[in-house]
Amino acid sequence: MIGLEQLTKVYGHGADATVVLDHLDFRVEAGEIYAVVGPSGAGKSTLAACVNLLERPTSGSVVVNGDVLSDLSEAQLQVARRRIGTIFQSDGLFARRTAAQNVALPLQYLGVTPGETRRRVAELLDRVGLADRAGHYPHQLSGGQRQRVGIARALALKPTVLLSDEATSGLDPQSTDAIVSLLKELRDDLGLSILFITHEMDTVLQVADSVARLDHGHIVESGRIVDLLQSPESDLGRALRPWRAHTEPETGESAWQLAYAAKSVPTDWITQLAARLGAPVSLLGASIETVNGATVGHATVGLPPIDPQRVVAAADELGLAAQQVSSGIADLERVA
Amino acid sequence: MSALGGFGVLANQTVPLGEIPALVLPALGETLIMVGITMAIVVIVGIPLGSIIFNLAPGGLFENRSLHTVLSWVISIGRSLPFLILMAAIIPFTRLITGTNIGIPAAVVPMSIAGIAFFTRIVENSLRSIPPSYARVAKASGASNLQVIRTAQLNEAVPSIIGGLTINTIAMIEYSAIAGTIGAGGIGYVAVTYGYQRFDNTVMGVTIVILVATVAAVQLIGDRLVRFTTPQLRTSSSSSSSSRLKTAVQA
């Protein structure tokens, strides 16, 4: 596991001091992928630099498997960094080294024998599906392949914690998918704790078990993805799965937003809702998918004039949170 | 030097055509020895010095503003003196080290000092062109500062440093001609004493041709080495991917 305990980073002194990270506290258990999202300037890069021990926190600590790693001397830090594998944005591969030589670097720094290094590098490149690209230089690889070499390098010293610092930013959707499935696979096979720092909400939904939103150095909201998506009042949940435009209701009907708010919403909820209300339910727009095994989503429906409280109650019995929309997308966004 | 001694008596006479090779070739050898020894010293001292000054600067591995300023000033002073003045100014120092103030050993001292100051800046500039993210990657992978400098800075800057080394070597060939005037011998000495002072246009022409050819050869070798050490340049020329793979594996 990796945990942050009251991690604070302040740049500058006195009146010029800027608090970049303000008492951050979270834990990523073994086998868990924890995403940290936030706009640029939120402190994500500083967080990454503190987690892989390139920057010393001003106060608070970074804990890996129970060991506090932030109060060490420079020489001890060099050793401690090996316990955390880092996947950098835009891979960070050395241009004058082949894929294999890049993956070998951490082993070389550690002083592993050439024979053992060769064996381990071959194993790692095979693990990320690039065994046939060992002799290629970075400029001969695609963005996704380079990032997979970066992952192999991060895994070279068998860390228990993987830090992914904007690893999928700038990749095309297919490459992002491939990297995301590789990370999930590695998490399952090696029991890694993965801290996934990104600004891409779509990727968070694909990869993470839990997520925290960082803003101005604070964690403003956090939780398990499924819980956030199923709680209608969560800002982060809504940001992860934004409402899209829907068809306007017929004259005389009013639009309602229904959000999946429970683990078990019946798949035929439209029929059931119509039966309960004794009125037709017209579907105006919907987005429903499975995230980490749970069905999440929301729908906009049109209903004839009915007592709003009856609608809310009926929807609630089906595990849906209902909210009336007066009309138009402008109002819809206000509600969302 | 000894090769030139025999021609000392031939004042106001042009060198016969047949004797030009015997005059010029040993002089070329002396130039190459002077520049060769100087460049060896320059590389041995300049690479560590350039790495140190780069990493003392803000953003470096062992940032230290005051030490950086001091070192930077010392190098700038070495760079700002015209070579002829530098050579004259440090004669006591040269004599202390070599025991003499004429000949090849005496020339190598000022040439090395000027060359080190030059090359330190070249190394520093080359390291600046390497993405700073490389050093972060290396540190996060558990590298010591020395390992970061070797693998993430110097090794990645090799093509750029070789390019700078080429420029530096050519500058040193030029300086060796100036050093020739303090009796260091070499092709520059021949050009000055025979070509310039005795108006021997043939000798002058031959020395010019030799200097141009030497500089061109250095430049050609330098360019080849830069090409060879840059994977993008080396591999784009090979047509098939199999030969590309072969080069990559060999490297």
Image (cartoon, coloured by chain):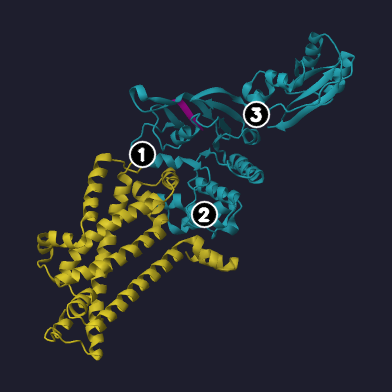
The residue that mark 3 highlights is A240
Q: According to the rendering, which colour does chain A have?
A: cyan
Disc 3, SS: helix
Q: Let me know if residue A293 appears in the view.
A: no
Amino acid identity at mark 3: Leu
Percent coordinates x, y for residue B29 in the rendering: 25, 77
| Range of residues picked out in magenta | A1-7
Q: Let me know if residue B124 appears in the view.
A: yes
Q: Report the chain holding disc 2.
A: A
Left or right of A154 on screen, residue A328: right
The dot on residue A18 is none
- Other residues around mark 2 within 10 Å, as few (<14) / some (14–19) / many (≥20): many
Q: Residue at x 51, y 29 (%)?
A: A42
The residue that mark 2 highlights is A121
The residue that mark 1 highlights is A76
Q: Of helix, strand and loop, which mostly describes the magenta segment?
A: strand
Percent coordinates x, y for residue B83 in the rendering: 21, 61
Amino acid identity at mark 2: Val
- Residues marked 1 and 2 touching at CB (< 8 Å): no
